[in-house]
Amino acid sequence: MTAQLKSTSQGQTMILTLSDPAMRNALGPDMYAAGIEALNVAETNPEIRSVIITGEGSHFCAGGNLQRLQGNREKPREAQAQSIEGLHSWMEAIRTCPKPVIAAVEGAAAGAGFSLALMCDMMVAARDSIFVMAYSSIALSPDGGGSWSLSHGLPRQLASELLLLGERIGAERLHTLGLVNRISETGHALTDALQLADRINARAPNAMSSIKELINDAGTHNLTTHLAQERDHFVNNLHHDNAGIGIAAFLNKEKPVYK
């Protein structure tokens, strides 16, 4: 079966499913390109307010296809560099997409699969799911932003342990550490992610986009720059139709329905 990225929708949520269960949904260039294209569709479709990325079958993603990587050793270095650029373009598309992106993880999330889950805005993981940065176990170093995400999200010593030793870490510990938002029972990660997405979808999409941008930029801004960005977003959102809907609904003790 050829690896593919399946795109479906449920309500106002686009569901992207990594589909190559025989290879535990290993990633490759075609999937990177399909992921970028799908996020472009989500960004331009006002009916879509959130995105979920999940894996087909009992695992989220095993990372890179080792047979393909072994074959790339016989090719010029540019071949692998171009492949990683494709992966990184997809990671940046997830981070910059104005719609919130949620990872729904079952089973294993390894290597670039772990990086992919970390790049999403929120993560729902089955209680027995396992995460591992397995690169060092095969004499490789991380890609997909995994070292960036772990270094920003965890103490240096723990990030070093996970990356240098390729240690496995469970969903419940990642939840305790703040990298997993919700723990699900086995087989229910997607269902619980959809419930989380529904809560996002009920809020004003312009506000969701502003908040995601502010979170993304906070790590690189000094306080003065960030305060100015917050001001500009606040003013823009106050003068958006949705602020009138939200404020009126709050004052009248009604449930808002945003555009």
Image (cartoon, helix red, strand yellow):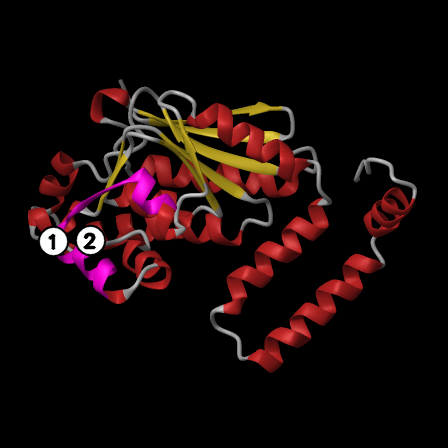
What x and y, as percent, mark residue 42? 59, 38
Res. 195 in view: yes
Q: Secondary structure at mark 1?
A: helix
Amino acid residing under circle 1: Leu
Kindly check if marks 1 and 2 are in contact, taking CB atoms under 8 A apart as contact.
yes
Residue 96 vertical placement versus 106 (above, below): below
What x and y, as percent, mark residue 14? 55, 30
Quadrant of the rendering where the N terminus is positioned: top left
Quadrant of the rendering where the C terminus is positioned: top right
Which image quadrant is residue 183 in? top left
Q: Is residue 160 magenta?
A: yes
Say which residue label 2 marks: 162
Query: Who is closer to the viewer here, 116 or 184?
Result: 184
The number of discs equals 2
Say which residue label 1 marks: 165
Range of the magenta residues? 157-175
Q: Residue at left 53%, top 75%? A: 221
Q: Secondary structure at mark 2?
A: helix
Left or right position of 207 against 190: right
Res. 7 in view: no
Left or right position of 79 against 234: left
Other-residue count near label 2 (Cα within 10 Å), few / some / many at <14 / 14–19 / ≥20: some
What x and y, as percent, mark residue 116? 36, 44
Other-residue count near label 1 (Cα within 10 Å), few / some / many at <14 / 14–19 / ≥20: some
What x and y, as percent, mark residue 176? 36, 47
User: Where residue 76 is drawn, which disc sits there?
Assistant: none
Tell me the CA gap for discs 1 and 2.
6 Å
Q: Is residue 122 magenta?
A: no
